[in-house]
Amino acid sequence: GRGIPDEIKGRVFEEGFKYGPKASTGFGLYAVKRLIERYGGEVRVEDNEPCGAVFVIRLMCV
């Protein structure tokens, strides 16, 4: 895909945020972030060269 513009990356985890023409509730990535953080982890979005985006999830190993 075309990826996520830099000016949007900081907002993709906001509750209700929608981007692009597809139907969306704007809740999915918000819920993922809250769940991951509840378990002490983190999630972020990065560029995936040469195009697209990748979501990175880090959790503690116990």
Image (cartoon, rainbow, N blue to C red):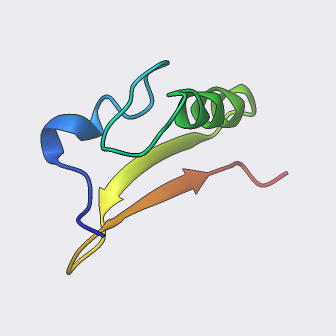
Name the residue nearer the viewer: 20 or 43: 20
Which residue is located at x 77 percent, y 55 percent?
Answer: 61
Residue 28 quadrant? top right
Q: Who's the residue at 67% across and 37% down the image? A: 36
Asked whether 38 or 9 is in front, the reply is 9
The residue depicted at 55 percent of the width and 28 percent of the height is 25
Q: Position of residue 12 (x, y in %)?
A: 38, 34
Which quarter of the rendering shows the N terminus? bottom left
Q: Is residue 52 above or below residue 12?
A: below
Q: Which one is nearer the viewer's eye here, 31 or 22?
A: 22
Q: Residue furthest top?
A: 15
Which quarter of the figure has residue 19? top left
Residue 60, above or below 11: below
Q: Is residue 20 left or right of residue 6?
A: right
Q: Residue furthest right?
A: 62
Q: Position of residue 48 (x, y in %)?
A: 30, 71
The residue sitting at 52% across, 44% down in the picture is 43
Q: Is residue 5 left or right of residue 4?
A: left
- Residue 30 position (above or below residue 5): above
Name the outermost residue toward the bottom.
Answer: 50
Say how many tags the image has.
Answer: 0
Q: Residue 2's spot in the image, x, y percent?
A: 23, 65
Residue 35 location (% of width, % of height): 71, 31
